[in-house]
Image: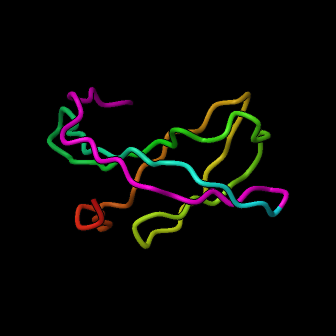
Amino acid sequence: MLEAVKKPHSLMRLPALLSGPDGGVTRCFVESWKEQSSKGRTYTRCRIVDDPPHLPDGEYVVEFAEQSIRTNKYHGRWELTFFCPDRDITDAA
């Protein structure tokens, strides 16, 4: 069962690098924010923005704020990513 989520708090925008399925690397930005569920749990979420429009669908690695996360692009859209609760990127902003 999915939990209801409150509005995002303190949006951060960080420069990032995307490594694609063809081995190419390109620049983008990652937006990150914290959300709280109806049960009081806090999650950190992020999404890729300002990426070049020509990037093909596939598996990617995004690197930012000393983090490296695998993500996917399907039908031209990035999957929304959740961080592990112990990851804190607030110092990178």
Rendered position, 16 above or below 81: below
User: Which residue is most to the left?
Assistant: 40
**How far across and how far down the image is residue 30, in percent?**
45, 48
Q: Residue at x 43, y 73 (%)?
A: 66
Rendered position, 57 above or below 88: above
Using the rendered view, name the quadrant where residue 88 is placed: bottom left
Rendered position, 20 above or below 73: below
Q: Quadrant of the N terminus?
A: top left
Which residues, given as a range, are shown in magenta?
1-22
Q: Residue at x 20, y 28 (%)?
A: 6
Q: Residue at x 32, y 66 (%)?
A: 87
With 28 as the anchor, is 33 left or right in this view?
left
Using the rendered view, name the quadrant where residue 14 is placed: bottom left
Name the one closer to the observer, 30 or 87: 30
**How far across and how far down the image is residue 65, in percent?**
40, 67
Name the one closer to the observer, 26 or 33: 26
Name the one closer to the observer, 36 or 25: 25
Q: Quadrant of the C terminus?
A: bottom left
**How far across and how far down the image is residue 17, in percent?**
58, 60
User: Which residue is most to the bottom?
Assistant: 66
Using the rendered view, name the quadrant where residue 19 is placed: bottom right
